[in-house]
Amino acid sequence: QSVLTQPPSVSAAPGQKVTISCSGSTSNIGNNYVSWYQQLPGTAPKLLIYENNKRPSGIPDRFSGSKSGTSATLGITGLQTGDEADYYCGTWDSSLSVWVFGGGTKLTVL
Amino acid sequence: QVQLVQSGAEVKKPGASVKVSCKVSGYTLTEISMHWVRQAPGKGLEWMGGFDPEDVKTIYAQSFQGRVTMTEDTSTDTAYMELSSLRSEDTALYYCAITSPFYRVPRWFDPWGQGTLVTVSS
């Protein structure tokens, strides 16, 4: 059981928009920055979003992040088949004194 | 641009230890904060521990306490993660990943090493 809760899977058609939720508590998302990672099949995770809503250099603006209270959301617009991957949210948990990840969400672009 | 290159795959017997290395280039170890994350086959990401720049010490996840040791060789800018008393459940990909040393707690991990597969089997 992950401390952060993500839907196991989401799907949408090419060109459409999808959102992935990440639910936590005041000890983690509520009081710390959230980051998001994309893991393409057979590769290492890659940073997509940091500090809730910032994109590293090279990440297209099709990817966006937001946070409200104890939940965070990753948005992807203009879906491409190359976006098919597992997506993870992560943050520090101040009560547990550990970094926690969500269980991951598998995105399928139909 | 910082790059992390990890050592190759390992096969170990239950009860043995494994030591995975992570060579940093583009920065020195003193300029970053190194962490380790593992991923069992078909499973999610699990943080193992990393460097706390405020207390200047390594912190470990409770589930690995007593079995894991993370060290650094600043002369070669290589970080190491040693896991002992291996069991079959430790079969996983082990990743090194870095974050900024300017914050007490990590805010993100970027970049990540390519991963090292550790297989524990009798």
Image: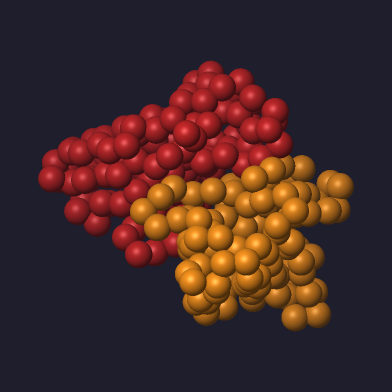
Name the spot of residue A36 as percent of width and height, x first.
47, 43
Q: In the rendering, what colour is chain A? A: red
Q: Residue B106, relative to residue B1: is it above or below?
A: above
Is A110 placed left or right of B22 in the picture? left
Q: Taking B39 as reference, is B73 left or right? A: right
Q: Is residue A83 left or right of residue B16?
A: left
Q: Write the residue at 39% across / 42% down.
A: A104
Above or below residue A52? Residue A107 is below
Observer able to see residue A17: yes
Outermost residue toward the front in this view: B122
Q: Quadrant of the N terminus of chain B?
A: bottom right
Residue B84, by quadrant, is bottom right
Horizontal and vertical percent position of residue A26: 61, 20
Q: Residue at x 43, y 43 (%)?
A: A88
Q: Nearer the viewer, residue B85 or A87?
A: B85
Q: Nearer the viewer, residue B46 or A83?
A: B46
Q: Look at chain B in the picture and name its colour.
A: orange
Rendering coords of residue A73 (x, y %): 41, 30
Q: In the rendered image of this protein, does residue B6 appear above or below residue A57? A: below
